[in-house]
Amino acid sequence: IEQTAYQNDKLAMLGKISAAIAHEIRNPLTAIRGFIQLLRPHLLQLGKDEYARIILMEIDRANDIIHEFLNSSKPSAPQKTVVSVPSLLKDTLLLSESEALMKGCEMRLQQINESLLVSIDVKQIKQVILNIIKNAMEAIEEVQGDHAGMIEIGAKQEGNYVNISVKDNGNGMDKTLLTRLFDPFFTTKEKGTGLGLSVSYKIIKNHGGTILVDSMKGEGTVFMISLPLTHQV
Ligand code: ADP
Ligand code: MG
């Protein structure tokens, strides 16, 4: 037990140091970004606008990584409020509707019992569902040819828990991929950070829930988030 406590201390310390470093790296990145933008007209004159574009894109990517990392390492305890599951899902879907439309992806929300209540940090759980929907859209984009993308979202009670499911007909995953997708920084995407799911996993665990995946290469994927139900309003 002592060994574990020591390890946890070390991990917490490491988390704090990394968060501090990540935070400090942001400032120089902001400065670099600003100056590249000032140089951009000159680079354009030299016919080197492509360089500016790449620099800006890569700075933004670095910023995204830091942003997601800071979100994940923040020790912030969930700020819980009681919400109904259908309204939570409706609100979350609204946030990804325009992107889905742009990508020609249909999103369907199943009929959900209004009396299903959860006590959650709404911002954090929305973030988790958005991460999963974003992955679903990206998995659909990976499928070649004329493909009618479809994302189905539902929620069902199971004992004292609610199971929220997000199902896509994207490219799916094989077994090796399935064992690694929650690892921090694991990504198969050129522009991925590999942080979305590891952050999501932490958030769900902090809420006393679980997150499971079922997938078939070439068929699609289902993510299942299980959260404890609450009664008090
Ligand atoms: P990122 O999206 O930045 O790659 P994530 O942590 O969100 O990082 O996801 C990790 C990896 O899991 C992805 O790169 C992808 O290979 C795989 N993955 C996640 N969701 C899906 C999905 N719905 N369909 C297929 N693969 C997925
Ligand atoms: Mg992702």
Image (cartoon, rainbow, N blue to C red):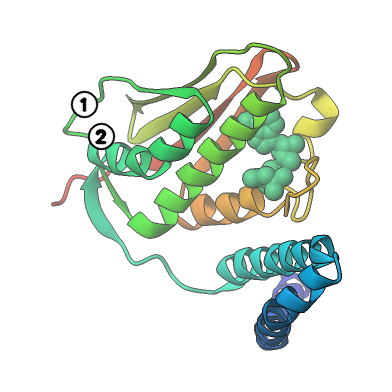
Instruction: Tell me residue 73's x, y (percent).
Output: 61, 71
> Quick check: 223 left or right of 173?
left
Q: Residue 214 appears in which quarter of the rendering?
A: top right
Circle 2 Cα neighbour tier, 10 Å, few/some/many (<14 / 14–19 / ≥20): many
Q: Quick check: 222 above or below 10?
A: above
How many numbered marks, from 0 up? 2
Instruction: Tell whether 127 sits left or right of 146.
Output: left
Q: Which corner quadrant holds the N terminus?
A: bottom right
Q: Residue at x 76, y 74 (%)?
A: 7
Q: Is residue 192 above or below residue 98?
A: below
Quick one: 161 or 29, which is closer to the camera?
Answer: 29
Question: Helix, strand, or loop for circle 2?
Answer: helix
| Image point (33%, 40%), residue name | 94
Can the viewer see residue 181 in this picture? no
- Who comes first in sequence, dot 2 or dot 1? 2
Q: Is residue 34 left or right of residue 125?
A: right
> What residue do we see at 50% from left, 24% from top?
105
Q: Nearer the viewer, residue 72 or 158?
A: 72
Residue 180 visible? The answer is yes
- Give me the disc on residue 14: none
Looking at the picture, tell me which residue is in the foreground, 112 or 130: 130
Q: Are marks 2 and 1 in contact (CB under 8 Å)?
A: yes
Where ligand 2 lies, by image quadrant?
top right
SS at mark 1?
loop
Q: Which residue is mark 1?
A: 113
Alpha-carbon distance for marks 2 and 1?
A: 7 Å
Q: Where on the picture, by quarter, is residue 120? A: bottom left
What residue is pinned by disc 2? 86
Q: Is residue 15 above or below residue 65?
A: below
Position of residue 153 measured from the top left corner of the image (x, y, whole percent): 41, 26
* Foreground label between 2 and 1: 2
Instruction: Give amino acid for label 1.
Output: Asn
